[in-house]
């Protein structure tokens, strides 16, 4: 689905995704792209945690927590976004 959303970012329904799912997919792709660049260690930590949050479907809004982490220069809000209980 991510390839389809990247190809048709203005029409996520064409890919079977909601607008919110399409935003998450595109943000995830941008985060992965940024990881390959030279970044401060704190920003790399925010991005890596965001990716883990998205992939493992943590509680809370991964995007909001990512933005918070950026603003705090690396302090991920674990009280708002964390692994779901029972998942490894």
Image (cartoon, grey):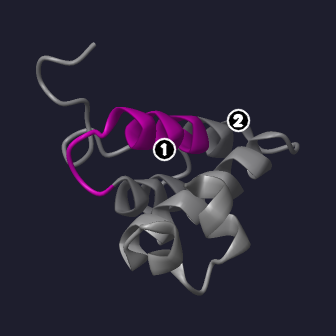
Q: Which mark is residue 10?
A: none
Q: Position of 11 compared to 65: left or right?
A: right
Image quadrant occupied by the C terminus: top left
The residues colored magenta run 46-61
Residue 84 is a magenta residue = no
At x 54%, y 43%, the residue is 46
* Position above or below: 64 against 13: above
Nearer mark to the viewer, of 2 and 1: 1
Whole-percent x, y for residue 5 in the image? 60, 67
Whole-percent x, y for residue 80 in the image? 21, 49
Instruction: Report helix, strand or loop for mark 2.
Output: helix
Q: Quadrant of residue 79?
A: top left
Q: Position of 58 compared to 56: left or right?
A: left
Instruction: Decide if residue 43 is in sight here.
Output: yes
Whole-percent x, y for residue 72 in the image? 48, 55
At x 37%, y 63%, the residue is 64
Q: Nearer the viewer, residue 68 or 88?
A: 88
At x 77%, y 49%, the residue is 33
Residue 52 is a magenta residue = yes
Q: Nearer the viewer, residue 16 or 42?
A: 16
Instruction: Report helix, strand or loop for mark 1.
Output: helix
Q: Nearer the viewer, residue 60 or 43?
A: 60
Q: Which mark is residue 41?
A: 2
Label 2: how many Cα within 10 Å (few below 14, some 14–19, many 20+): few
Instruction: Decide if residue 75 is in sight here.
Output: no
Q: Which mark is residue 50?
A: 1
- Label 2 and label 1: CA atoms lie apart by 14 Å
Q: Residue furthest top?
A: 88
Whole-percent x, y for residue 67 in the image? 47, 62
* Position above or below: 27 against 45: below
């Amino acid at each position: 689905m991510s390839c389809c959303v990247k190809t048709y970012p203005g029409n996520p329904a064409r890919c079977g995704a909601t607008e919110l799912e399409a935003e998450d997919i595109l943000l995830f792709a941008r985060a992965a792209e940024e990881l390959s660049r030279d970044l401060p260690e704190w920003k790399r930590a925010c991005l890596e945690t965001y990716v883990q949050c998205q992939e493992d479907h943590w509680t809370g809004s991964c995007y909001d927590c990512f933005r918070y982490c950026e603003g705090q220069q690396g302090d991920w809000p674990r009280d708002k976004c964390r692994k779901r209980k029972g998942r490894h």
